[in-house]
Each structure stands twice: as structure tokens, then as C-alpha cells.
Amino acid sequence: MPTPSAARIHEFEVVSNTPVAEGIWSLVMRAPKLAEGLSSGQFMSIAVPGDATQLVRVPLSFSKADPVKGTVETEYAVVGDGTRRLSLMRPGDTSDVLGPGGHGWRLESHPRRVLLVAGGIGITPIVSAARWLAREGVEFDAIVGTKTVNTLWGFDELMSVGVQHVVITSDDGTAGDQGFTTDALEPALAGGEYDLVLTCGPEVMMHKVADICAAVGVACEVSMERMMTCGFGACATCVVPTRSGNVGACMGGPVFDAKEVVW
Ligand SMILES: Cc1cc2nc3c(=O)[nH]c(=O)nc-3n(C[C@H](O)[C@H](O)[C@H](O)COP(=O)(O)OP(=O)(O)OC[C@H]3O[C@@H](n4cnc5c(N)ncnc54)[C@H](O)[C@@H]3O)c2cc1C
Ligand code: FES
């Protein structure tokens, strides 16, 4: 028997929903039970009001869960109809959210120092990882990749939670070093300081991050994005091929050991 999902449906109220970079919004919702239950790297699936023909929820990671205030924060890119309608929600608006989904980052290797690698909107669960590492007393650095300076979010948040060193890369050179996160990763790992890399971003980036880590023998966890129709293990739209067969990202992920993924 597969393990039943821990996800439940929670009512939420929008506290704030504002643009924070070009095409990127930050939503803070009040959902106290969800805020208590989320672990870093897990996700939630939001029912977005506004179109009764759209039955599928929008799966999103979170950057901050505050059990004291009862709030959950997520940053999301407006890419299609669901996220466009989400960006129209205003403070006081209500809907419901399914979560916590799947399982998140692990610290099984008891790392001394962690390198976080975020590409684009993959920064959302990476900021959550940074908060968690800071709480656990684990030192960490970050590489953050963005298309351009206008789409950059997360630098201030990483600084505020105590990241030691951040390298920014941008495709067009308008922020930090021109190039990709993976260009910065190889020299960063060459010093042998890190024993774990956590990464989220475009799949092509995560694949390369996984290969670079494997080549130098550094453990790596990847947060995989998939279409998710149900979000609780019932539909098999979210499979990730692994060395042990196909695994649903909504229950067996979204975080995977990079060595397990068949890219
Ligand atoms: C575990 C997980 C965490 C995620 N975290 C974030 C995050 O923190 N921030 C962020 O900006 N994006 C995140 N995404 C991607 C986000 O879910 C999609 O961008 C969003 O669902 C697109 O919906 P749409 O209706 O705007 O776009 P459309 O392309 O119009 O989508 C049409 C339908 O397909 C589904 N769909 C489309 N793309 C995806 C996708 N990649 N994954 C799952 N369902 C999809 C949607 O449910 C929607 O109903 C995450 C995805 C997953 C699986
Ligand atoms: S989204 Fe339905 S099984 Fe994973």
C-alpha cells in the first residue's frame, strides 16, 4: 500500500499579493494549520478562483511558513491562465489550498556546508531551504541565476537569513556575472568546501548541476517540477523516472536524490 498523503484542504485568506520582480509575484496567505505543517521543500496546490472551467489547482513551493503568524508565503511566475488569475487575488479574498504536499529537502548526509543553486523562479524553495539551514545551524552559500536584473528576486531574502556568500549570474550580464549558474558551480565546488548541493530551477540546469556534483563526489538534491493534476498520488501525471522505476513527484518528491533520477 502506498503511504497516504498528509495533505489536507485548508481555507486561506490573502494577506498580500504584490509584484516583486518582472513577471514574479509574492503571495502571503493566512492558513494557520498549513503554516504549522509545511516542511522546507514541500509544496501546496492552490485552487484559484475566477474560472469555473479550470478544475486543476496550481502547485507552488513556499519560501516562508510562519506558524506564529499562521501565514505562508510563495513567489510565483505568471506564466498562464492559473497564475494570471492568482495574481488578481486581493487582500481579504479567500479560496482553498491543498497541502502539505510530498516531501522536502533532507539533511541525511549531515552536511558541514551547503551550496544552494537556484535558477529563475526555482528560488522560491531555495529561500525556504536557506531559512531552514539557518535554523539548523548549517552554514550555506548560494548561486542565484536569473534571465536579467529585472527578473531577479531572493538576494535580499538570502542575505537577511544569513547566507555567507551569494554569486548572482544572469543570461544577459545585467546582474552579477554573465552566464549560467552551472558556470559558477564548477569553480565553487573545486575548493572542496561543500558536501551537499540543493538545487531548483529549469530541468536542464538541474541535470547539469547533478552531473557536476556527481563528477566531484558531492551529494545533490533536486526539486523536480512536473505537471500535477491531483497533487496527492491519484493520477500519475507527475512521474519522474528513477533508478527504482517511475516515482510520482507529488508523493515521492518533489525533492529527489539527484543520483536516483534518470535524466
Ligand atoms: C512541486 C511544484 C512546485 C512549484 N513551485 C513553483 C513556485 O514556487 N513558483 C512558480 O512560479 N512556479 C512553481 N511551479 C510551477 C507552477 O505550478 C506552474 O507554473 C503553474 O502551474 C502554471 O499554471 P498556469 O495555469 O499559470 O499555466 P498554464 O500553462 O496555462 O497551465 C495550464 C494547466 O497546466 C498545469 N501546469 C502547467 N504547468 C505546470 C507545471 N510546470 N507543473 C504543474 N502543473 C502545471 C496547471 O495546473 C494549469 O491548470 C511548481 C510546480 C510544481 C510541480
Ligand atoms: S499529481 Fe496526481 S499522482 Fe502526482
Image: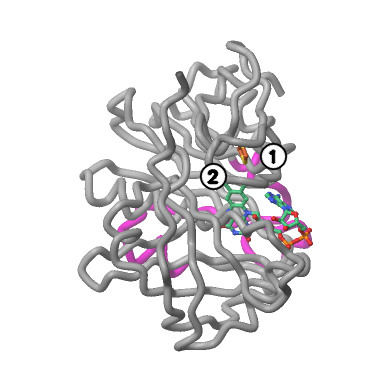
Residue 124 appears at what percent x and percent y? 51, 57
Q: Quadrant of residue 72?
A: bottom left
Please check the rendered image and state whether residue 160 is part of the magenta-colored stretch, yes or no.
yes
| Mark 1: secondary structure | helix
CA separation, marks 1 and 2?
Answer: 10 Å
Residue 252 appears at what percent x and percent y? 51, 29
Q: Quadrant of residue 46?
A: bottom right
Amino acid type shown at disc 1: Met
> Is 149 located above or below residue 50 in the figure?
above
Q: Could you tell me if the residues under marks 1 and 2 are in contact, i.e. CB atoms within 8 Å?
A: yes
| Mark 2: secondary structure | strand
Q: Earlier in the sequence, mark 1 or mark 2?
A: 2
* Viewer-closest of 42 and 138: 42
Residue at the spot of label 1: 205
At horizontal 67% and vertical 40% (from top left) the residue drawn is: 183
Please check the rendered image and state whether residue 64 is part of the magenta-colored stretch, yes or no.
no
The boundaries of the magenta stretch are 155-184
Answer few, some or many: residues within 10 Å of disc 2's Cα (few below 14, many 20 plus, some between 14 and 19).
many
* Viewer-closest of 133 and 51: 51
Quarter of image, ligand 1: bottom right
* Viewer-closest of 240 and 130: 240
Residue 210 appears at what percent x and percent y? 60, 27
How has the structure been colored for display?
Answer: one colour
Residue 164 left/right relative to 125: left
Amino acid type shown at disc 2: Val
Residue at the spot of label 2: 117
